[in-house]
Amino acid sequence: MILGHMTLEEKLAYVSGVGFPNPSPSPIGIFNIKPIERLKLPEIYGVDGSIGFTGQGATPGTRYPAGQLLASTWNRERAFDEGVAQGQEGRARGVHRILGPAVNFYRTPFNGRSFEYMTGEDPFLGAVMVAAEINGIQSQGVMRPLSTTLPMMRRSTVSLST
């Protein structure tokens, strides 16, 4: 419904990111979504947070163990509790969405983000543990949007404009 009221320029600007609120202009805060005042859409603050907050113009936050370590516990309650903790920290920082936990198979050492992934080679374990952590995050009123990434080996060569 809202998309029908947005101009093409507003749609493109809406997903391009803005700086995190801080005293000086900065390129940080790329995970934020710009406000569209004409449509009364507020700015949405987001952080990269698969294993804890990574700055975004504020002091770094709590760091959590790699996703594989949490998954190795097979403990849904622990995953939920970690999500609750991330959600609480996010709310305290004024964050609306967290980009984490990460889900992917890592069968190659060329993927530089494997430390973030909770799934390893077991899709069932990943589905159970990641869902528990996301439920914990969202129980605190913080969004965990569904997202996808291009394969790491091709992400600098794939064009989304063609």
Image: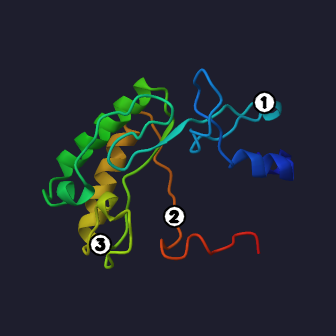
User: Is residue 79 rendered to the left or right of residue 151?
Assistant: left
Name the residue at 26% across, 70% down: 120
Q: Nearer the viewer, mark 2 or mark 3?
A: 2
Tell me the residue that label 3 is attached to. 123
Closest to the observer, 86 or 59: 59
| Residue 149 % position (x, y) | 51, 65
Between residue 24 and residue 90, name the one nearer to us: 24
**Farthest residue toward the bottom?**
107
**Label 1 vs 2, first from the N-terminus:** 1
> Mark 1 highlights which residue?
37
Q: Inspect the image, locate mark 3, and give the three-letter code of the amino acid beneath it.
A: Pro
Of the residues under marks 1 and 3, which one precedes in the sequence?
Answer: 1
| Amino acid at dot 1 | Glu
- Rendered image quadrant of residue 49: top left
Residue under label 2, please give it: 148
Specify few, some or many for label 3: CA neighbours under 10 Å numbering under 14, 14-19, or 20 or more.
some
Looking at the rendered image, the quarter that the C terminus falls into is: bottom right
Q: Earlier in the sequence, mark 2 or mark 3?
A: 3
Residue at 65% over, 44% down = 17
Q: Are marks 1 and 2 in contact (CB under 8 Å)?
A: no
Give the spatial CA distance, label 1 vs label 3.
Answer: 42 Å
Residue 38 placement (x, y as % from top left): 83, 32
- Where residue 141 sits: x, y (%)? 44, 34
Residue 80 vertical position relative to residue 92 in the rendered view, above or below: below
Which residue is depicted at the point 57% across and 39% down?
A: 28
